[in-house]
Amino acid sequence: MWTLFEARQYSDFVNCMIARLASQRTNLDPGQRGTDLYFLAIAAFACHDYQSATYFFDAAATEDFNVPDTENQPAHLFMRLDPSNPKQAAREIVLIIVQELDRARDNYKRRPNPDQLSVDVVRDYFLRPLMMMRDKPERRTLATTFISFLAEWNYRLQMIELSTAGSKEPFFTHLSRGCLLFESLLKENPNEPVTSKTSDLEALLRRLGKYLGIKGAISTSCSDFDALVRSLTDKQPMHSAIECTAQTRNMLSHSVVWPTDLNGRTYDLLVNNIASSCLHAISKLYVPLP
């Protein structure tokens, strides 16, 4: 099986490793199971299955709670996007995702009146605390979704103009996941906890508006996705970026059938709006208040 990994036959390796882990279950000690899951994650990433990859990395990190020096295990280094230790097989993947995070952060910082958000702030106040929550493992979904959303971005951007007619499903589901991440970041924030996970997004934005620095109401309703796409411009203020994210969230949660001339430029603008909204939520709601 490991010869498949060494030969870069990653799809076959994924199939074999899933079968091995399913058959062995409790027969493997945590260290071995964590190692298997970690390399399964690397192979899934190479197959462009970013959601499965981050799921496997997180599963490996879960196993690492049962071994010494948990925070310095490779899976935990990955899940907090820490490339500083060269002794991690997935380091090149970490560097790729950090590059995408840097791109999103640079776009965020070019908007009017941004926070001076750094990768270290995202790592120290968002990713690391989530990964150490043994008592609330479900919250780590915020980290896996954040990472997989960034990881998938450039891959979808390379694809989008290969066919300009027909289905937009892979792009819509990527966008929808980023919008759902933004909404989840609002609801799960530690500085101003929200008790109801089903609260209306527009009401939620009104409640958290003062923390987000939003002046004026945010309209979450929109009936024309193509009009929204055509209205996109570079470096929109955060109020506009968040409104765009909220409207995209509501439209794509109700239908994946929208006639639109979504292309590389407008897709990138839309992803940047969503990524900036997520980074803004992290900066305003996850960094400890002064």
Image (tube, helix red, strand yellow):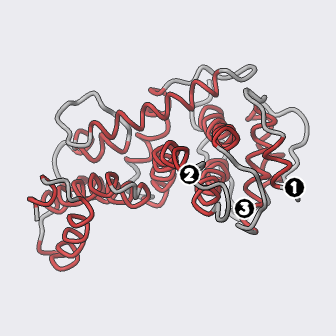
Nearer the observer, 265 or 17: 265
Q: In the rendering, at what x and y percent does residue 24 appear? A: 15, 76
Q: Residue at x 65, y 22 (%)?
A: 115
Q: Give the residue type that dot 3 points to.
A: Leu
Query: Which of the numbered marks, if any, corresponds to residue 212?
Result: none
Q: Give the residue type that dot 1 points to.
A: Cys
Residue farthest to the right? 216
Residue farthest to the bottom? 23
Q: Give the residue type that dot 2 points to.
A: Leu
Q: Which residue is mark 3?
A: 252
Element at label 1: loop
Q: CA distance from mark 2 to mark 1?
A: 28 Å
Image quadrant in which the N terminus is located: bottom left
Element at label 3: helix
Q: In the rendering, at what x and y percent does residue 155 appear? A: 48, 47
Image quadrant in which the C terminus is located: top right
Q: In the rendering, at what x and y percent does residue 65 appear? A: 25, 53
2 vs 1, front mark: 2
Quick check: 199 left or right of 117? right
Q: Residue at x 47, y 27 (%)?
A: 119
Nearer the observer, 151 or 121: 151
Of callouts 1 and 3, the N-terminal one:
1
Of callouts 2 and 1, the N-terminal one:
2
Q: Is residue 10 above or below residue 70?
A: below
Label 2 packing within 10 angstroms: few (<14), some (14-19), many (20+): few
Nearer the observer, 70 or 80: 80
Q: Which residue is mark 2?
A: 162
Q: Which residue is mark 1?
A: 222
